[in-house]
Amino acid sequence: MDCATFSKKFQENMNALGLPAPQSLFSSLTTALGNLTALLGAFDAVGPTATVEEILKATTLKEKLSVGGLMAASYYIGATIGSILVAAQAAEACKDPYRNNLSVQRYRAFWIWLASRGVMVPIDFQIFVQNNPEVIDDSPRRQSYAMRARQHGAKQ
C-alpha cells in the first residue's frame, strides 16, 4: 500500500464521486473537520431540503464550491463525510509498520470479520492461528497440518 497524504486521498475519493473538493477547504484532517462542522451547522439551520447553494450562503466559508447549486446539500455533505473517513483511514494506515505485510493484514481482517459477527476468539487461539497460518492461508504447510495435529494428540 502506497502512502498518501490526507489531502491527496480526500481529493481522490471526491474525484471518484464526481464532486469538487477545493484544496483550501480540505487540505488536512483538522481543516476538513472544521469546514464539515460549518457545512453541517448551515445544513441544520437551513433544513434537510437545502441545496448546496443555500448551504454556502449560510456559511462563512470564503471559497465557494463549483458544484451545481441545485444539488442536494445532503449528497455533498455525505460525500464529504465519506471522503474524510477514507482519507483519515488511509493516512492512519501509513503509520502502521505492517501495512505491506499481507499475512498480518489477512489476520487482522479475519479477526475483525469474526468480531463483527459477535465471535470473540480468545487470545490463545489467535496465537495458535498466527503460529499455524495454513488454517486460514493457502500455503504448502497445509498438507502437513493433520499430521502435526495427530502428533499433538488429535484423533483421526
Image: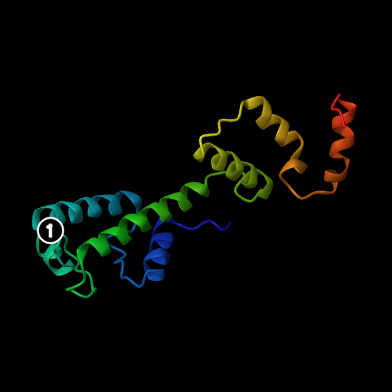
The residue depicted at 15 percent of the width and 58 percent of the height is 48
Q: Position of residue 100 (x, y in %)?
A: 63, 51
Front residue of this view, candidates 105 and 21:
105
The residue depicted at 60 percent of the width and 30 percent of the height is 121
Q: How many marks?
A: 1
Residue 104, quarter of picture: top right
Vertical relation: 107 (above or below) 35: above
The residue depicted at 15 percent of the width and 56 percent of the height is 43
Residue 73, quarter of picture: bottom left
Please identify the quadrant where the N terminus is shown.
bottom right
4 relative to 49 in the view: left or right: right
Vertical relation: 133 (above or below) 49: above
The residue depicted at 42 percent of the width and 62 percent of the height is 8
Front residue of this view, candidates 77 and 114:
114
Front residue of this view, candidates 119 and 83:
119
The residue wearing badge 1 is 60
Label 1 is placed on what type of residue? Thr
Q: Position of residue 13 (x, y in %)?
A: 41, 64
Q: Position of residue 114 (x, y in %)?
A: 56, 39
Secondary structure state at the residue bearing disc 1: loop
Please identify the quadrant where the C terminus is shown.
top right
Q: Residues within 10 Å of mark 1 (few under 14, many from 20)?
A: few
39 relative to 28 in the view: left or right: left
